[in-house]
Amino acid sequence: MIKSVWSVTLYVSNLERSKEFYEKALGLNKKYEYSSYVGFECGGVEIGLIPREKVDIGEDAASIQFLVENVDEVYRTLKGRGVSFVVEPHDEPWGGRQATFRDPDGNTLEITQINWKRYFTVASEGA
């Protein structure tokens, strides 16, 4: 059902400052950069940065995205197991299909299916 961790997303107070830290201090390779998101490669897991003001979250929020083959199928399975979703399955312009839920402590978890052709086209075009 869940294949791997696709990404860990951090919500930051200053996107430019955080980008510099992850790129220059930590030495991570930047995959792409948009005005509302910067993604870094980290051993097969993407580290994503989103400006905190773009989302309604708490101070220390982060999210983990699990890569799956079929979001709708996994969504139905998890719903059947009592998982309550806060965002229903939907398509993203970058080629993802996602649904969002929370664990018992309120941590944000997402299931993500990727249309790789669309993903690579958008990534190569940039923002």
Image (tube, rainbow, N blue to C red):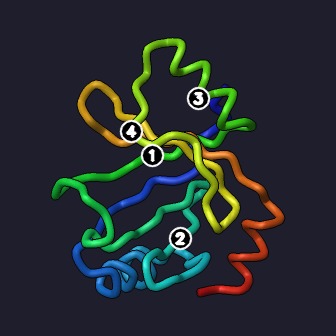
Measure how far apart labels 3 and 4 are at the Cα level. 12 Å
User: What amino acid is found at the position of numbered circle 2 in the picture?
Assistant: Phe
Residue of label 2: 40
Vertical position of residue 42 compared to residue 78: above or below: below
Residue of label 3: 75
Name the residue at 35% across, 61% down. 10
Vertical position of residue 22 compared to residue 111: above or below: below
Vertical position of residue 119 compared to residue 80: above or below: below
Vertical position of residue 105 compared to residue 83: above or below: below
Disc 2, disc 3: CB below 8 Å?
A: no
Q: Which class describes the residues within 10 Å of circle 1: few (<14), some (14-19), or many (20+)?
A: some
User: What amino acid is found at the position of numbered circle 1 in the picture?
Assistant: Ile
Q: Is residue 127 left or right of residue 24?
A: right
| Residue 101 sits in quarter | top left
Q: Return the mark for residue 64.
A: 1
Measure how far apart labels 2 and 3 are at the Cα level. 27 Å
